[in-house]
Structure formats: C-alpha cells, structure tokens
Amino acid sequence: FPSVHAARAVFLAFVLHTLFRSTLLFSVLVFCAAFLVCISRVLLHKHDIVDVVGGVGLGVLFFLLLF
C-alpha cells in the first residue's frame, strides 16, 4: 500500500508552496520537511521505498487534481 504519510506531506508541501510563494527559504523548508517525512517512513521500517514513492506520486496527483 502507498504511504499516506508521504502523500499527505508532499501534498501539503505543494499547497503551501503554491499559496505562500513569499520566500525561497520557506519553500525549501517545507519541501525538506516533506522529504524528511518520506525518509523517516523507510528508516522506521513502516514502509518500503516503493510504498513511499507511490505515496509521493499520490500526493502530486492529488495536488494536480485540486489545483
């Protein structure tokens, strides 16, 4: 199953980047946080790499469908 945590983190990163394009630092921090969520799912052995990649794909897909 795809990682819902990764999907949600990536989706929120894209939403926050789209809504608050004020600074580059904010965007970098938001995407770093999403990346850390994705990496933590693998390091904690909750998901495999393929599950996290699927979650990232779902997050991007949900963002593209809504915006």
Image (tube, rainbow, N blue to C red):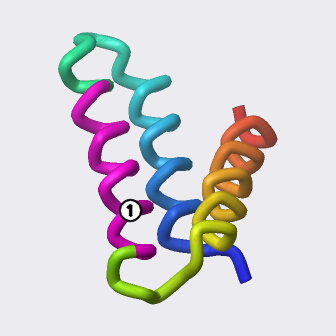
33 magenta-colored: yes
Q: Secondary structure at mark 1?
A: helix
Magenta-colored segment: predominant secondary structure: helix
Q: Nearer the viewer, residue 12 or 34?
A: 34
Q: Is residue 17 left or right of residue 22?
A: right
Residue 64, compared with residue 19, is above or below; it is: below
Rendered residue at 35%/76% (across/down):
43
Number of numbered labels in the structure image = 1
Residue 55, compared with residue 11, is above or below; it is: below
Q: Nearer the viewer, residue 38 or 58?
A: 38
Rendered residue at 46%/48% (across/down):
12
Rendered residue at 26%/13% (across/down):
24
Instruction: Give the amino acid type for the residue marked by disc 1 in the picture.
Output: Ile
15 magenta-colored: no
Residue furthest bottom as drawn: 46
- The residue segment tinted magenta is 28-42
Rendered image quadrant of residue 55 = bottom right
Give the residue pinned by disc 1: 39
Q: Is residue 36 left or right of residue 9?
A: left
Label 1, residues with CA under 10 Å away: few <14, some 14-19, many ≥20 = some
Residue 31, compared with residue 7, is above or below; it is: above
Q: Is residue 37 left or right of residue 49?
A: left
User: Residue 19: x percent and y percent?
Assistant: 44, 25
The quadrant of the picture occupied by the C terminus is top right
Rendered residue at 45%/56% (across/down):
9
User: Residue 13: x percent and y percent?
Assistant: 43, 41
The quadrant of the picture occupied by the N terminus is bottom right
Q: Nearer the viewer, residue 4 or 16?
A: 4
